[in-house]
């Protein structure tokens, strides 16, 4: 609401400076029509040059951020103020555009440079026609009908990233698409290499954080002939699975069903946006190793494949580490069947998770077991979570009971290699439940040293 108030204030300032029209544009209008509160606000200003916009805002006491000057954009907090413009593609790379702003362009012409019709709806902020909707490309109908439609036939050719953005929108808003839209995306598949890996990651991450229909989005990429750019998923197609255990079909169908289950699990567990993104993405990646024809356990090879895939996309390193760990540990429950695990086994798992949240691991296990339609959802990790709560290690790495200061206090060992070896052995013994408090740990260490000597 504060951002919208600021937008109205900015519109009033620009109108007094001579702007002929000031519109809300893009996602903020789309979100309002869809019934959600917009976070970021975009304004498009007509009748003023870029310098006039900046000058009028500065005179009103604002401090405009000119980082977007090359795209005729001024930023004030979460409000972006732009001029209508045309973008002329002059090369193959994503940045190979000539941007020409034109404050006297007709609004319907300015809308044509946008990606999808649902993002080309405008809402007037001007005092004469405040809140009037201007929808030259039929974006409202597209929203009502749940369809994604490009603003122009050459849209995907000019910016192939829009194909990945389309997948993200399909996941978020459960959209359908026409054969014409699919064909336009297919024609752009050869331009994939022109997209920077950072932007690919950005769209994929948004899809996993915000998406509701992940499987539908991945199938769109397949139908648009883009899935071969993501062999970590394409290679799972036709990888057979035990039909009794996996009635859903091949490993590809399982990955998609697990990701869709992960969305619902993340919402039920009230995960943060980052944790939801991690859970959905690891659900998509957890069985990547099934495409590996080597004799290794697929969780181990899958962890390596997931790490390589994410590193190639320049994903944040902490997310890479979490996903790699979760893929490596996603089969842990299967080795124990339906039995309640001993506390020492849960402690060992927490040690291997090495700081990764226990509930993320449990949620992945649940998504894996729930991604087998028509079998009903189930959570075999529940007993593991119960044990973890009992011994109070759900979100923490297990802290060693015996530390170097204790060895020095009891004059058992001096600093050096021997102390390091003793502490390592003591930690292993603690995980094996050979002692449970400091007094027992000190006695254990004394006995250990006596046997060693």
Image (tube, rainbow, N blue to C red):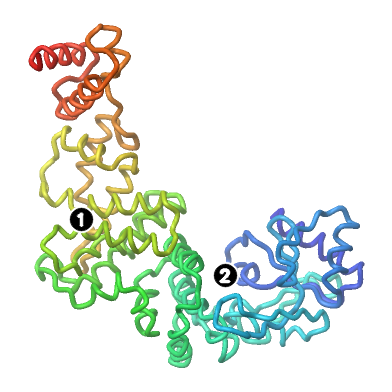
Q: To which residue does mark 2 refer?
A: 34
Where is residue 160? Give x, y as percent. 51, 80
Identified at 23% across, 76% down, the residue is 237
Residue 117 visible in the picture: yes
Query: Can you identify the residue that label 1 sits on?
Result: 300
Residue 429: horizontal and vertical position, in percent? 16, 25
Q: Is residue 190 above or below residue 274?
A: below
State the SS at label 2: helix
Q: As displayed, is residue 98 above or below residue 270?
A: below
> Residue 76 occupies which quadrant of the picture?
bottom right
For image coordinates 19% across by 25% down, the residue present is 430
Using the numbered discs, state the Cα–Cα distance from disc 2 to disc 1 in whole angstroms.
43 Å
The C terminus, quarter of image: top left
Q: Position of residue 31 (x, y in %)?
A: 59, 68
Q: Secondary structure at mark 1?
A: helix
- In the displayed structure, 58 sits above or below 446; it is below
User: Dot 2 surroundings within 10 Å: few (below 14), some, or many (20 or more)?
Assistant: few
Q: Residue at x 11, y 46 (%)?
A: 336
Residue 8 falls in image quadrant: bottom right
- Badge 1 local density, few (<14 within 10 Å), some, or many (20+)? some
Q: Quadrant of the N terminus?
A: bottom right
């Amino acid at each position: 609401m504060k951002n919208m108030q600021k937008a109205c204030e900015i519109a009033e300032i620009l109108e007094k400076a001579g702007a002929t029209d000031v519109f809300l544009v893009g996602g903020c209008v789309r979100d309002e029509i869809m019934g959600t509160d917009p976070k970021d606000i975009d304004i498009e200003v007509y009748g003023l040059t870029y310098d006039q916009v900046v000058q009028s805002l500065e005179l009103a006491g604002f401090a405009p951020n000119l980082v977007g000057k090359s795209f005729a954009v001024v930023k004030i907090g979460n409000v972006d103020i732009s001029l209508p413009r045309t973008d002329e593609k002059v090369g193959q790379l994503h940045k190979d555009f000539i941007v020409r702003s034109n404050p006297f362009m007709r609004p319907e012409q300015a809308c044509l440079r946008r990606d999808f019709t649902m993002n080309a709806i405008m809402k007037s902020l001007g005092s004469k026609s405040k809140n009037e909707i201007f929808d030259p490309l039929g974006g409202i109908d597209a929203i009502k009908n749940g369809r994604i439609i490009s603003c122009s036939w050459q849209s995907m050719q000019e910016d192939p990233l829009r194909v990945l953005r389309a997948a993200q929108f399909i996941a978020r808003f459960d959209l359908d698409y026409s054969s014409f839209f699919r064909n336009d995306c297919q024609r752009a598949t050869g331009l994939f290499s022109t997209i920077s890996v950072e932007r690919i990651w950005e769209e994929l991450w948004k899809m996993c954080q915000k998406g509701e229909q992940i499987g539908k989005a991945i199938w769109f990429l397949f139908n648009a002939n883009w899935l071969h750019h993501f062999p970590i998923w394409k290679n799972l197609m036709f990888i057979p699975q035990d039909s009794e255990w996996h009635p859903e079909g091949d490993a590809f169908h399982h990955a998609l069903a697990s990701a869709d289950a992960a969305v619902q699990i993340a919402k039920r567990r009230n995960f943060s946006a980052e944790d939801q993104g991690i859970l959905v993405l690891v659900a998509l990646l957890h069985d990547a190793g099934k495409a590996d024809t080597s004799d290794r356990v697929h969780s181990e090879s899958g962890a390596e494949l997931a790490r390589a895939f994410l590193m190639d996309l320049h994903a944040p390193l902490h997310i890479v580490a979490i996903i790699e760990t979760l893929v490596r540990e996603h089969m842990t429950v299967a080795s124990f069947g339906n039995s309640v695990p001993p506390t020492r086994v849960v402690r060992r798992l927490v040690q291997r998770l090495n700081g990764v949240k226990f509930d993320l691991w449990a949620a992945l296990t649940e998504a894996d077991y729930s991604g087998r339609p028509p079998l009903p959802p189930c959570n075999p990790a529940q007993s593991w979570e119960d044990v973890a709560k009992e011994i109070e290690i759900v979100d923490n790495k297990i802290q060693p009971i015996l530390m170097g200061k204790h060895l020095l206090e009891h004059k058992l060992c001096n600093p050096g290699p021997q102390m390091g070896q003793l502490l390592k052995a003591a930690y292993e013994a603690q995980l094996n439940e050979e002692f449970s408090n400091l007094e027992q740990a000190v006695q254990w260490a004394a006995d250990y040293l006596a046997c060693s000597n």
